[in-house]
Every structure is written in C-alpha cells, then in structure tokens.
Image (cartoon, rainbow, N blue to C red):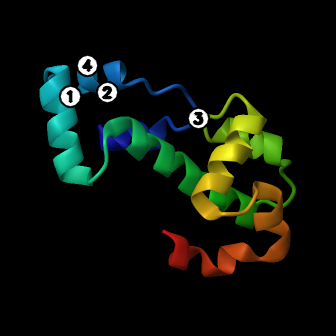
C-alpha cells in the first residue's frame, strides 16, 4: 500500500482503493495502517503529497506552483496553497522564494 501511494501521489488515492489493495476490511485496514504509520490513511497520503511538494518547490524552480500542485495530486491550486500553509506556516511561493526549505527538518 505504501509503495502504491508513493508511486501514485499525482492521482486520486481514495481510502477505498487502498483498502482494496490491502485485501483487508476497511475498518481493519484503517486500524492497522494508523498503528503502522502513525496517521490515518487519508492524512498519510496528504502528508506524503506535501513532502513531495516541498521537494519539488526546492529543486524545480522552473515549475510553476500550479504545476507542482498538480504533480502532487492537488487539482485545485488554492486548496494546495491553503493546506501547504497550514502544514508549513508559509505559502508555497514564499517557501520557494525565502529559502524556508532550509529549515524543513524543523517543521516535519
């Protein structure tokens, strides 16, 4: 399931799809996943997307923020910006232009 998530962060990853891959019941999957990863499946996917976005913002300054959002599975750039800001305390554009990524380890 983790490999599937990592390979498909740019696509929708509904919990139902992850449940199907696991072969477990939804309740059992959610419980096991949260025990294993420390987060519910949907929150884990969101965190993985935000981590990928942070990497792309730091390493691909030629990509517009909207494109980074799409590559990380966010259809709506405004929602991406809102979630990114909630997680990192700064917008994706500010993150990229201020060098905030240098202290990324302190925020994760």
For residue 45, side relative to residue 30 (left or right): right
CB atoms at circles 1 and 3 under 8 Å apart? no
For residue 14, side relative to residue 30 (left or right): right
Marks 4 and 1, how far apart at CA = 5 Å
Which residue in the protein does label 3 denote? 10
Residue at 73% across, 46% down = 81
* SS for callout 4: helix
Marks 3 and 4, how far apart at CA = 19 Å
Residue at 12% across, 29% down = 28
Q: Which of marks 1 and 3 is nearer the N terminus?
A: 3
Marks 2 and 3, how far apart at CA = 15 Å
Neighbourhood count class around disc 4 (C-alpha, 10 Å): few under 14, some 14–19, many 20 upward: few
For residue 2, side relative to residue 73 (left or right): left
* SS for callout 1: helix
Residue at 58% across, 57% down = 87
CB atoms at circles 4 and 2 under 8 Å apart? yes
What numbered label is drawn on residue 18?
A: 2
Marks 2 and 1, how far apart at CA = 6 Å
Which residue in the protein does label 4 denote? 20
């Amino acid at each position: 399931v983790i490999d599937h998530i990592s390979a498909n962060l740019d696509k929708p990853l509904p919990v139902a799809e992850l449940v199907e891959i696991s072969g477990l019941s939804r309740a059992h999957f959610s419980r096991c996943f949260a025990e294993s990863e420390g987060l519910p499946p949907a929150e884990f996917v969101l965190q993985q997307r935000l981590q990928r976005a942070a990497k792309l913002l730091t390493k691909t300054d030629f990509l517009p923020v909207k494109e980074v959002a799409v590559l990380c599975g966010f259809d709506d750039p405004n929602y991406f910006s809102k979630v990114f800001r909630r997680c990192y305390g700064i917008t994706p554009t500010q993150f990229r232009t201020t060098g905030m990524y240098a202290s990324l380890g302190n925020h994760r």
